[in-house]
Structure formats: structure tokens, C-alpha cells
Image (tube, helix red, strand yellow):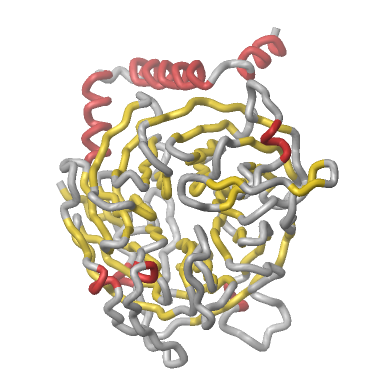
């Protein structure tokens, strides 16, 4: 009888599992003897409050320690993902690699152990040949070359395919990793998403898409893929597609997921809009920006920031239009960070003034942005942005991530001589590789019954 019950639980759909978890929460509240309506109202009010994790008071970024890595990649780095202790890199030649970080070896250059230790590497395949013939290129709406995978020509009712152990045909467009390192997903120009074991690199299964995916996120063991104008949500444990959300009118360029309490995603698109998708209700809210957007981040529950050619746009959940704009001249205004060997000269070229990457600490006051030749650190207070520091880099910033490890805060920057989403420009002085910057910002460890950050709650 017990075996029969376990089988029934595994075969339940995603909607049934959500309904079952909600009923269990309601039964727990009733057994505790509380009023269900009042408790749910208090939870909603708690989520609406702004709780800021004050990180920047510990900032000591006058001088920084830098570490560069190329690691067997032959072209520009296009995207970065990380788990708690592993860094994943993707490049334009279809190569995906994983590296383990030992922060205690960064400062001591004479140590025998290297700061980054390679775990695995899956090299890309530059050409697709079926029956000895090279497949023709296809172009999407953005003008990017698509080199579709042979799996994509197989018509079936399911997008899930068998494990594919080789590399991608074409460049990597998006990477996502789970926090525990169990899964890492890579998407390429071959319209294939390959889900692998995050520690060994073994392929678990693959997903066929109709078009390229420019952004992916994994929270828990749920994968969100931004394909063209839709969001597709997959359960990685069950190898199944949960649901699809539609709404955008053009290619989605960025996606941000906050935490499990919200169970939602914020996306930006070329259609000049930012949309808030609620996974539970499967509804959406539309926020207009008036310009095509490149990236987005979600620092707090009611504040989200988008990057574009107009600089940075700050949105709040209360208003449809941006409440603040950081002009490109302010984004490119170099404050300096004590780096003597690097100099920054702002470009007048339109393509080199785009804010191409954004990241933040969830519920924190720290936001970081990247454009051509520059990585900027911002302090987010309420809905205002103030620049704290700048770091000059070599080449285009195709992606960046903030990583907390061993009470230290690091910036991972994917650099390239060419932009990640096209080769309309080239910087001969650029660097194809990874740049790791130590922000000199100690992060307190969590103690029992308290957060590792000092919370400041605004009513």
C-alpha cells in the first residue's frame, strides 16, 4: 500500500502539487488555531514591505584584486552562471566549462594551487553535417545566424529529448545553474537546451526550442526559458514541461527571478516593455519603458531596474512608467577605483553605450552594471541609484554576476572582443575571457535566528 501511494505522488501534475501544498499550509494554520484570513493578510503585508540588506557599508573597494581566465575557450565569453561554489562559463564557440573557486589562493600569487580549478569542459562543434551535408543557416528576427540542431527537425508532441553528450553547434546564448550545483542548463544558437549534472558535466536530457533562448534562470529545480516572446517553465526533477506564459510581442532579452516566496519572474524585451509574470495565478503586469531593453535585475520586491541605450531605468510596482532614469553620460562617468594599469575613455559610438548586463543581491542595496569597457557599482536606496565605484575592463561586458563565497563578495565578468548577440562591432584591444574582481566587501555569516545582513525595514 505504501508503494502505491508513493507512485501516485510522483505521477501528480504540477498544478496538483501546488494545490496539495496550499491545502497543507491551510490545514497547518487551522490546527494552530489562528485565523486564516488574518494570517494570509499579514503575509501579504510582510511581502509588500521593503527589507534592505545593507551590504555597501562594509565596502572597501579602493583597490581591487583581479584574476583573468581564458580556460580553453577560443572565442568571446557570452554568459556566466554560478552555484554556491562552482562557476560555469559559455563562449561563442559553443564551449561550456565549469570551475571551482578557491578564494584563499587569489591574493597569494606564489601558491602552487590555482584559484580556479577546472571540473569539466564540453567543447562546441562548429559545423552541423547531416548525411555528409552542411546544413544551411537560418536568420531570426534579430538577424542572428541560427544553425539548428538535427534534433530540431524531429516532429513530436514533447520537447524533451534524450541526453546529448556533445557540445553545441554554434555559440552559447544563455546559462543557468541551480544553487546546489545539481543542474546546469546551456542554450545555444542551435535551438537546443542541454541540461547536465552541475558537478560532473554528464548530460541528463535535452530540450528542443523553436527559436534561440537569450535568457534562462533556475530557482530550486525549476527551469525558466525565455524563448522568443514566451516563457517556458520546466521541472528538472521530473523532466517535464509545466506550463507556458505568453505576453511579449518580441524577443525576450532578459529575465530575473527573486525567491520562492514570490514565485514570479520579471522579463524585459525588444518590444519596449517590462513584464511581471506570476507563476501561481499565471497572470502578468505590463510596465512600459519607451525603448528596447537589454537586461533587467530585481533588487527588491517592489523595485526592478532595466538596462538599455538610455542608461538605467528604475521601475516600481506602483507606477507603469519608470520613476527614475540614469542618463548614459552618468553611467559612463568614471569615478575610478584605484586601478592604475587600466584607463577608461567613454566611446561616442551608439553600440558601445548600451548597458548590456545587470545583476544585484536579492533584497539588497547593491546593483552592478556593465557596458563596453566599464563595470559600475551602484547603491539602490528606495528607488534611487547612486554610483559608488567604477572598474575599467578590456572589451565588451557580455554578462556579469555577483557571487558570495566564504564571506567575500566577487564580481564575475564575461568579456569579449565582440558583443555576445552579434558581431556588428569589434574591439581589437579587448580580452576574450573571464575577469574576477574582489570587491573587498566582507559579508557577515549567518547566525542562528538572524540574517547575515542587517535588515532595514521601511513601512
Residue 345 appears at what percent x and percent y?
A: 36, 84
Above or below: residue 426 compared with residue 144? below
Assign the N terminus to one quadrant of the image: top right
**Figure disc tally:** 0
Q: Is residue 186 visible?
A: no
Q: Is residue 222 visible?
A: yes
Answer with the quarter of the image where residue 338 lies.
bottom left
> Which residue lies at the image location 68% right of the left edge and 38% below the top edge?
206
In-front residue for pair 263/276: 276
Residue farthest to the top, as pictured: 1
> Which residue lies at the image location 74% right of the left edge and 43% below the top edge?
203
Residue 191 relative to residue 165: left or right: left
Answer with the quarter of the image where residue 402 lies.
bottom left
Above or below: residue 83 compared with residue 349? above
In-front residue for pair 302/254: 254
> Which residue lies at the image location 65% right of the left edge and 43% below the top edge?
148
Residue 128 relative to residue 442: left or right: right
Residue 360 appears at what percent x and percent y?
A: 38, 58
Above or below: residue 337 compared with residue 19? below
In-front residue for pair 92/70: 92
In-front residue for pair 53/420: 420
> Which residue lies at the image location 57% right of the left edge and 27% below the top edge?
241
Amino acid at each position: 500500500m505504501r508503494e502505491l501511494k508513493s507512485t501516485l505522488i510522483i505521477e501528480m501534475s504540477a498544478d496538483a502539487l501546488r494545490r496539495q501544498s496550499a491545502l497543507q499550509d491551510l490545514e497547518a494554520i487551522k490546527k494552530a488555531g489562528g485565523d486564516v484570513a488574518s494570517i494570509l493578510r499579514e503575509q501579504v503585508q510582510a511581502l509588500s514591505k521593503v527589507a534592505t540588506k545593507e551590504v555597501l557599508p562594509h565596502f572597501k573597494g579602493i583597490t581591487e584584486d583581479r584574476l583573468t581566465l581564458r580556460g580553453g575557450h577560443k572565442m568571446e565569453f557570452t554568459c556566466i552562471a554560478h552555484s554556491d561554489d562552482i562557476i560555469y562559463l559559455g563562449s561563442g564557440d559553443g564551449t561550456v566549462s565549469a570551475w571551482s573557486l578557491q578564494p584563499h589562493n587569489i591574493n597569494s600569487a606564489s601558491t602552487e594551487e590555482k584559484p580556479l580549478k577546472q571540473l569539466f569542459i564540453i567543447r562546441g562543434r562548429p559545423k552541423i553535417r547531416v548525411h555528409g551535408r552542411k546544413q544551411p543557416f537560418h536568420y531570426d528576427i534579430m538577424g542572428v545566424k541560427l544553425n539548428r540542431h538535427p534534433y530540431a527537425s524531429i516532429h513530436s508532441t514533447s520537447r524533451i529529448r534524450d541526453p546529448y553528450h556533445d557540445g553545441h553547434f554554434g555559440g552559447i546564448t544563455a546559462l543557468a545553474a541551480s544553487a546546489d550545483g545539481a543542474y546546469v542548463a546551456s542554450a545555444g544558437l542551435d535551438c537546443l537546451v542541454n541540461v547536465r549534472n552541475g558537478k560532473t558535466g554528464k548530460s541528463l536530457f535535452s530540450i528542443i526550442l523553436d527559436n534561440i533562448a537569450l535568457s534562462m534562470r533556475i530557482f530550486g529545480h525549476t527551469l525558466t526559458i525565455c524563448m522568443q516572446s514566451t516563457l517556458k517553465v520546466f521541472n528538472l526533477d521530473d523532466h517535464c514541461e509545466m506550463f507556458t506564459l505568453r505576453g511579449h510581442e518580441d524577443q525576450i532579452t532578459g529575465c530575473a527571478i527573486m525567491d520562492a516566496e514570490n514565485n514570479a519572474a520579471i522579463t524585459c524585451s525588444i518590444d519596449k516593455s517590462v513584464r511581471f509574470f506570476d507563476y501561481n495565478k499565471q497572470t502578468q503586469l505590463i510596465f512600459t519603458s519607451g525603448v528596447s531593453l537589454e537586461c533587467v535585475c530585481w533588487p527588491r520586491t517592489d523595485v526592478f531596474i532595466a538596462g538599455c541605450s538610455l542608461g538605467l531605468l528604475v521601475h516600481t510596482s506602483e507606477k507603469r512608467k519608470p520613476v527614475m532614469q540614469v542618463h548614459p553620460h552618468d553611467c559612463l562617468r568614471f569615478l575610478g577605483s584605484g586601478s592604475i594599469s587600466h584607463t577608461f575613455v567613454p566611446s561616442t559610438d551608439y553600440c558601445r553605450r548600451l548597458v548590456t548586463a545587470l545583476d544585484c543581491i536579492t533584497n539588497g542595496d547593491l546593483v552592478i552594471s556593465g557596458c563596453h569597457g566599464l563595470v559600475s557599482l551602484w547603491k539602490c536606496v528606495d528607488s534611487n541609484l547612486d554610483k559608488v565605484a567604477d572598474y575599467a575592463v578590456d572589451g565588451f561586458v557580455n554578462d556579469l554576476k555577483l557571487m558570495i563565497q566564504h564571506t567575500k563578495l566577487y564580481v564575475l565578468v564575461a568579456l569579449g572582443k565582440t558583443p555576445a548577440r552579434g558581431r556588428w562591432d569589434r574591439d581589437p584591444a579587448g580580452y576574450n575571457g573571464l575577469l574576477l574582481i574582489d570587491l573587498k566587501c566582507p559579508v557577515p555569516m549567518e547566525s542562528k535566528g538572524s540574517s547575515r545582513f542587517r535588515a532595514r525595514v521601511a513601512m
